[in-house]
Image (spheres, grey):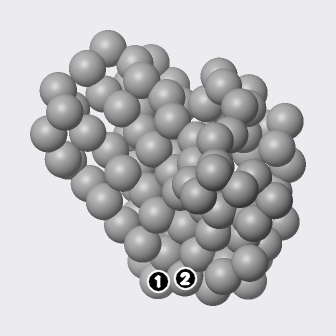
Amino acid sequence: MKYDELDLMELFLSESESLTDNIGDGNITYKISKDDFTLKIFIRTYENQISVFLTYKEKDIFNGDFDNITELKKEDMYLRVLRENSTIASLCFGTMLSISIENQ
């Protein structure tokens, strides 16, 4: 899976954290909160998988697992989740955090 760590840091306004306390194993997470919304993404680099979680006031709004991801790509205030050059999900980092799922 291809992604630019600096782009993710810019969108999430923080560095990644290890899911397993072993930063070299490719299992990382990013998290951002705006108002009462929290968006988390778990990246499992070597399995080409990501999990996305969106909560509002600590209540789940959305969670999704995506397989066979080839790239995470920043475009303006969006993070595009790509599978074979096709966007399958977009995470919006605008005034409100949101997720849109494309037809797969």
* Of 9 and 94, the residue lying toward us: 9
Residue 49's x, y, as percent?
58, 75
Q: Residue at x 74, y 78 (%)?
A: 46
Residue 86's x, y, as percent?
67, 76
- State left or right for residue 20 relative to residue 82: left
User: Is residue 87 in view?
Assistant: no
Question: Image quadrant of residue 30?
Answer: top right
Q: Residues within 10 Å of mark 1 (few under 14, many from 20)?
A: few
- Tag 2 residue: 67
Q: Residue at x 32, y 14 (%)?
A: 35
Per the model, the C-alpha gap separating discs 2 and 1 is 12 Å
Q: Secondary structure at mark 2?
A: loop
Residue 32's x, y, as percent?
49, 29
Residue 24's x, y, as percent?
81, 59
Q: Which circle marks residue 76 in the picture?
A: none
Q: Residue at x 65, y 62 (%)?
A: 27
* Of 22 and 73, the residue lying toward us: 22
- What amino acid is labelled 1 in the image? Gln
Question: Image quadrant of residue 28?
Answer: bottom right
Q: Residue at x 58, y 48 (%)?
A: 29
- What amino acid is labelled 2 in the image? Asp
* Of 70 and 32, the residue lying toward us: 32
- State left or right for residue 46 relative to residue 103: right
104 vs 20: above or below = below
Q: Which circle marks residue 104 in the picture?
A: 1
Of the two numbered discs 2 and 1 on the same chain, state the one appearing first in sequence.
2
